[in-house]
Every structure is written in structure tokens, then in C-alpha cells.
Amino acid sequence: RSQCLCGASVCPSSFQAEWLTDRLPCATATVTASPSSYSFTISLSPSSLTRGSALPSAVAPLSLAVLLILSFVCPSISLTMSSVSDDYRKAAATLSKDQAVHYKELGSAWAAANGFVVMRPTGLQVAPCSLTPSPFPSKVYKQCKDLIPDFGKLVHAVSKDHDFINQHLAPVAESDDFQKKLLDIYNSVREEGVRQPISLAILRSDYMLHDNGDASPLQPRQVEINTIASSFAALSEKATLLHSFLLSRSPVPPLDPKNCPPNAPIDNIASGIAQASKLYEKAEPPATGGAGGRKIGVLFVVQPDEGNVFDQRHLEFRIFDKHSIPVIRATLAEIESESTLDEGSRRLMLRGFEISVIYFRAGYAPTDYFGDSEWSARLKMERSAAVKCPTAAYQCVGAKKIQQVLAAAGETERFVDKATAKRIRASYAGLYPLGDGSEEAAKAKARAIENPDKYVLKPQREGGGNNLYDQDMKQALETMSDHELQAFILMDIIQAPQSPAVFMRDGQMVECDGIAELGTYGVSISNGNKLQRNDYAGHLLRSKMASSKEAGVAAGFGVIDSPYLY
């Protein structure tokens, strides 16, 4: 107390601050001094710990330890710690009430004029959206963007491993009728002989940011990989354009529209479908009589009374505008009753068109199958010569059980090289089996019952609203048999940061704390074992209220958003 840390009896405040900052490069020091005393205020920001490439990962705990020691040696030192979640929150926009109302009015007009809409029972409405983009770390965004070709390789390789698929999904199928019927179609067509070796995949890998709580930077944790009906590509592109327009037209400092990354999934996905159609035409020459009367079309398999119809229509119109390929829309029931399959060539005909590509925007949930006719249609299409997006094999690989198995030690490494596996594995959340008689499954179940707030119970379902949390999960784990539990997996809860947001849904504004989920689209085309295309195609950001467990937009839990990189 009688002498400055630098050794002098009197020391300039600036030198004291410089001395501390030199020794604690991750800290910001400020000093106040008087002739008789001085005090330090030292702020350590964890998000800055890795910004200097020369700093080792151990700097965070080491710097904190030094600060704590200083606080005991000199009580006049006060310590403040800002978390990575705090940094995330500070990067978000804050709208005043007047600004929010202005953004709602201007944004609604832009959305209506540009097709950023959904169909409701009452008519057209602006798509559920955030009025401003949500913050997202630029480093993590790039990591997720770069990962989608890796997952393209992984999904393709797994889809070719017949024994792996059956080994892990057969037990699930014993208590999950939907998975059983899909697996039966996969196996029966494979036994008969796959007619079309060309396949198209439009994938979307979804991630949430995870705060480890140990001062390390936010990291992506994969929620799931979607291999069928990866929706909202078109509306996500519209959300990016909406936010760029609003920030340019009515700026909200410090947000800069230049920090909204470009997003063009409509063109990229349309080009993938068109490329698959051209490959079909090349592989399947016209029947005897020439190509004069041949009409090629792409089939969109859709749900009756589809609410997200305009997300699909934007893609449909882009396919025709840029590639001159018409799209035929039909439900599973309509396909069964109206289409014909030539048993010789197995060419699929519908409404006068020879179907080159089948793009599934339905068929991913039990609710899409009202009876045997829908399953018959699914089998008919799988047997056909058309390029499927996805094949039954790809859809099987999208099951949560496969995701859980691939996260186990050594499993991802079976299908991709070590470098690719390492990148993929860095995004995995904790995933655990249930009901299979293993010690791991028994321990995971016990942990989840004891700490139900730390886990989520997930069935083999898509579309949102299917997961079980907290006491509902605990009750299910305590009451279901091991046989029933094999149809589920257990996953660690992702500790996601929150940021202030203003959502607009059904024409109403809601101010809340939001949690974001980033999806990255990928387009891959294969012929047999060979991948001919495997590209990043765009992104989707969805946000939900922090109080909500689920994030599905179509299921009514979330809104369409876009990332603001910081």
C-alpha cells in the first residue's frame, strides 16, 4: 500500500494502467489516483481472450487467478467480469418504441410487396419475423458455413452403408411404426434393385450457440441435420433482404447493413434441382419415337393446404425462370391416384409430364400419411427412375438415432477422413442412447431423471414440437420401457446466449429476449458412390423467445431472422 507496483513511491496513473495491461493482456485497467491513495478497476472480457493469436488457451484462467490474487493483496482493486453472453447481448440492436412501430409498418409493406408471406386460414400474412437481425459471431458463422460440405460427405457415406442403417434403425423400428415403414421401403427397394443411382440432397444443418460458462468463446452445437424437406430457404433469403433494407432505409446505430452476410439459397437450390433434372435426361434417353413429345417436369411433393406455400413457390418460379423446367405440385394421395409407373422402364408419369426429380416437401412426419395410399405413393416414387430428393436411404440417415450414433467415439471416423471428422465432431452436442441395455444408456437415463433441466428427450421426428423437456421428460423416462425408449435419444441442453429482440407474428409485435438457431443449407448430387456436387447453398436464422423450448417457425414457436455478424 505504501509503494506502487512498479516500485516507485509515487507513480503516474497511466503507468499503473500500462503495467497491468502489459501483464494481463486480456484485461482493461483504469486507475484513479490522489496524492495519498490510488485504486484500480480491472475488467476482464473473456471474448477477447482468443483475439490475439499469440495468446495460449490457458490465459483465461491464469489472468483471472492473477486478478483474484491482486484483489486480496489490495482490497482497493475491484474486479468486474463480462461473460461471452454479455458480449453477445451488447451486439444486438435496441429499438425504441417509435423505432419498433416504424420498422413494423415499413417492414410489413416491404414484406407484402416482395413475397415474404405465409398462408393462414384467414388469408395472406407477413411471415413471422424479427424486426432486426440477431447478433452472431462471425467466426462461428464461417465455421458453420464451412461445415456443410463436410456433413454432405458424411451423410452420403452413411447412406451407402446398408448394414449400419439397419443395425441402428431396426431396434427403433420395433417401437416406431413410422420409422418401420420407411425402413421397409428402403430395404424392399434395395432388394429389388435401385433403379436410379443418381440422387439429390438438399441438406440443412442446424446449430445453436453454446456458452460453456468457462470464459471460452461461444461455440456452435449441432441441433440436428435435416435430410428431407429442408424448408424456409426462400423466406430466409427474403429476411436477409428485409433487414438489409430496413437498416439502410432507417439506420439503427451501431448496426451496419454491411454486416448482414449475403444469402442466395433460392438460386443455389434451384440450380441443384435443375442440374439433377439434366442428369436424369442424359441418363434416361427418350422412349422410342424421339423427344418431340417428351415433357420433363419436377415433382414437388406437398402437404394439403400448405401454409408455407410461398417458400415453395419462390423456388418453383426460380426453377422455371432460370432453367425453363416446370414444377408439378401434388400431395401423396394425388400421386398415388394420378401417377403411373411403367414397370419396364420405371418412368414416373404425372399429369402428362415425365418426372425427372422428386423433391419432398412432405412425407417427413406420420401426420403426412393418412393411410395406406400415402405409403403406397412413397414406395412407388422410391421404385421409380426419377431422381429422389431425398432417397429413402438419405431420409433414414436423417433420423435422430443415426445422429446420436455418429457422435459416439470412432463412429464419424468410420465414414470420413480424420481432418473432416475432427471438424464435424467439434460441433457435436452431448448425445446418448436409451433403452439398448448398455451401461451408457442406463447412466444417461439416471442423470436425466436426476437433472431434468439439463437434457432433452428427442424422438425420430421432424417439424418441431415433438421433444420432451423437464418434468415431461422425467415422467417419460420413468414410465416408458426400454423397448419404447429405443425410439428416443437423449441430448444435452445447449446453453444458448440471449439478446433483446422485437418479433412480429400474426401482425403483432412482441418485445422479448430471443435465442437464435442458425441453419446452413447444402446441395449435393451423387451418382452411385461418387459425389459430383457438394456445395454450401445459403443460411437460415430462426429465433425464438428465450422462454420457449422449441424453435420451429411452421410449428408456431419461432420467427424467421437473419444474422448480424460481429
Image: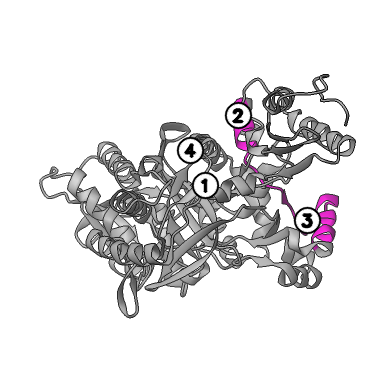
Residue 397 visible in rendering:
no
Q: Secondary structure at mark 1?
A: loop
Q: Which mark is residue 331?
A: none
- State yes or no: residue 43 in magenta: no
Depth check, mark 4 against mark 1: the one in front is 1
Amino acid, disc 4? Lys
Q: Earlier in the sequence, mark 3 or mark 2?
A: 2
Foreground label between 3 and 4: 4
- Is 443 part of what is drawn in magenta? yes
- Residue at horizontal 80%, vertical 39%? 77
Tell me, yes or no, whether the two marked residues, 4 and 1, touch with CB atoms within 8 Å: no
- Residue at numbered disc 4: 145
Q: How many marks?
A: 4
Disc 3 vs disc 2: which is toward the camera? Answer: 2
- Identify the residue under disc 1: 91
Q: Earlier in the sequence, mark 2 or mark 1?
A: 2
Amino acid type, residue under disc 3 in the picture: Asp
First reached walking from the N terminus: tag 3 or tag 1: 1
- Residue 25 x/y as whole percent: 69, 26
